[in-house]
Image (tube, rainbow, N blue to C red):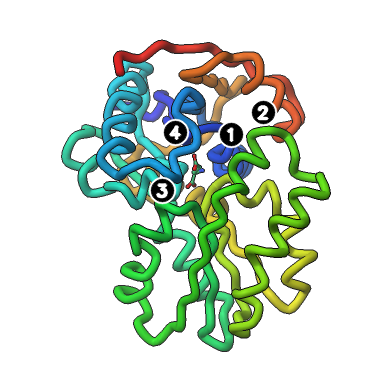
Amino acid sequence: MNRYKAIAMLDSGVGGLTVAQEIFRQLPAENVVYFGDTAHMPYGPRSPEQIRGFVYEISAFLQTQEVKALIIACNVATAAGLNYYAQKVDLPLLGVIEPAVRAALRHTKTGKIGVIGTAGTVKSGAYSRAFQRLAPEVELYSQACPLFVLIVENGLVNSPEARCVAQKYLQPLLAKGIDVLIMGCTHYPLLAGVVQEIVGPAVRLISSAEETARETKELLACRNLLRQENPAPQHRYFVSGPAKPFADLAATILRRKPNAYQVILPW
Ligand code: DGL
């Protein structure tokens, strides 16, 4: 185990890139290996058992890539079994749910917080449990937004359809008087423009990216694994589906063309 190894990250598709971008910003000397499980996207409607199986296979692959830590840059995969992965994966491990909860708690004044996520994340109750543990007095209102991931993965972020769907999903939360809204899916920050327009400036949007990157930095520093200098940081991207559509969409998010490679895993 040494500090010259890369940070591994995984998501069902491009959503985890919102966390990756923040890792690039806060930990600029780190090499990163990213895995998008596009062959199985969306994860949201799948069972926790199935998602755990995918994550297990992906992490086995990532561990062949000289990595020193693993970020589950996906809420529904975090909800499906962070403790399970911790028993199976021999790497320092981070999810995205608790970082988002801590960030939300820093910003709420009314204690009324909304969370939007995939059907799987909302059904798992993972956010409710995290708030119960960290701030049981919070009033939490959840809303599943199953079409958001498909809108992002199909490059429809700025479409009239996105606005119309967002309006329908967000209206019930607004009626509760929330002052903070957690984007409880790593794909959703890519829709932040339309979401913010609908909820208005009085509602603070929270993405787990910033806090997850900060906690990653702390975790690596405390294990003496933080890399301080790197003249040419490498970012490598692997996908379980075809590489080109992922690379094209990722290029619009990262504003540079990533090198993406398809990996066929045994599932
Ligand atoms: N980006 C993932 C998350 O944070 C989920 C996307 C999906 O449903 O595949 O939950």
Q: Quadrant of the C terminus?
A: top left
Marks 4 and 1, how far apart in space?
9 Å
Residue at 58 percent of width and 76 percent of height: 107
Name above or below for residue 95 compared with residue 38. below
Q: CA distance from mark 3 to mark 2?
A: 21 Å
Give the residue type that dot 4 points to.
Leu
Which circle's residue, 1 or 3, is located before the other in the chain?
1
Kindly identify which numbered label has been placed on residue 14: 1
* Residue of label 3: 76
Looking at the rendered structure, the kind of residue marked 2 is: Ala
Please report whichever mark, 3 or 2, sits nearer to the chain's N-terminal start: 3
Q: Which sits in the foreground, 27 or 202?
A: 202
Question: Mark 3 or 4 closer to N-term?
Answer: 4
Confirm or deny contact between disc 3 and disc 2 (CB under 8 A). no
- Quadrant of the drawing holding the N terminus: top left
Give the residue displayed 35% in from the left and 35% down from the top.
69
Question: Do the CB atoms of the residues marked 3 and 4 lie less than 8 Å apart?
Answer: no
Left or right, residue 79 beside residue 205: left
Ligand 1 within 8 Å of disc 3? The answer is yes
Q: Label 1: few (<14), some or many (≥20) within 10 Å?
A: many
Q: Residue at x 56, y 14 (%)?
A: 242
Describe the element under mark 2 as helix, strand or loop: helix
Q: Which residue is mark 4?
A: 10
Secondary structure of residue under mark 4: strand
Tell me, yes or no, whether the two marked residues, 1 and 2, touch with CB atoms within 8 Å.
yes
Q: Residue 250 bears which disc, if any?
A: 2
Question: Where on the picture, by quarter, is residue 192?
Answer: bottom right
Q: Nearer the viewer, mark 3 or mark 2?
A: 3
Judged from the image, the secondary structure of the residue bearing numbered disc 1 is: loop
- Does residue 66 appear left or right of residue 141 in this picture? left
* Disc 1/disc 2 C-alpha distance (Å): 6 Å
